[in-house]
Image: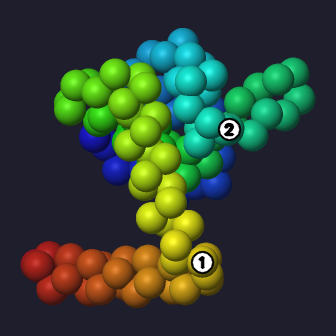
Amino acid sequence: MPPIPDKRYFSIGEASDLCRVKSHVLRYWEQEFSQLKPVKRRGNRRYYQQRDIQIARDIRHLLYDQGFTIQGARHQLAGKGRALASLNDSAVAADSLAAVRRELESIVQLLTP
């Protein structure tokens, strides 16, 4: 999968390219998975955030790579949501992710000639 660019919002076309599925598949998944909720703006246009892209990629992995049914994938995502909710403090989670990102960037700098 291509890396998710550091943008705030993505169109449905960009999201479908990043998830390697067609746009109509993303629209269908919105109906089937309550976790996937892109922001809808003027004219009912969908704007996906990075979190939505990651959820769509998780759904794709569960359905296409691991062979889950829609219902099974829904159950798996619900379990993952509970695990993330147990962090309670989103600031702590954001700080942890930022620290990991800084560490990875420093490793890349060391490896780049």
Q: Residue at x 20, y 30 (%)?
A: 65
Q: In this picture, is 107 found above or below 14?
A: below
Local crowd size for mark 1, using a 10 Å CA cut-off: few (<14), some (14–19), many (≥20): few
Amino acid bearing label 1 = Asn
Q: Quadrant of residue 99?
A: bottom left
Which label was assigned to residue 33?
none
Q: Quadrant of the C terminus?
A: bottom left
Residue 6 at x, y = what percent?
51, 59
Q: Quadrant of the N terminus?
A: top left
Q: Quadrant of residue 40?
A: top right
Amino acid bearing label 2 = Pro
**Which residue is the site of mark 2?**
38
Q: In this picture, is 16 found above or below 102?
A: above
Residue 4 at x, y = what percent?
42, 50
Q: Residue at x 44, y 77 (%)?
A: 97
Q: Secondary structure at mark 1?
A: loop
Label 2 or label 1, whichever lies nearer to me, is 1
**Which residue is the site of mark 1?**
88
Residue 21 appears left or right of 51: left
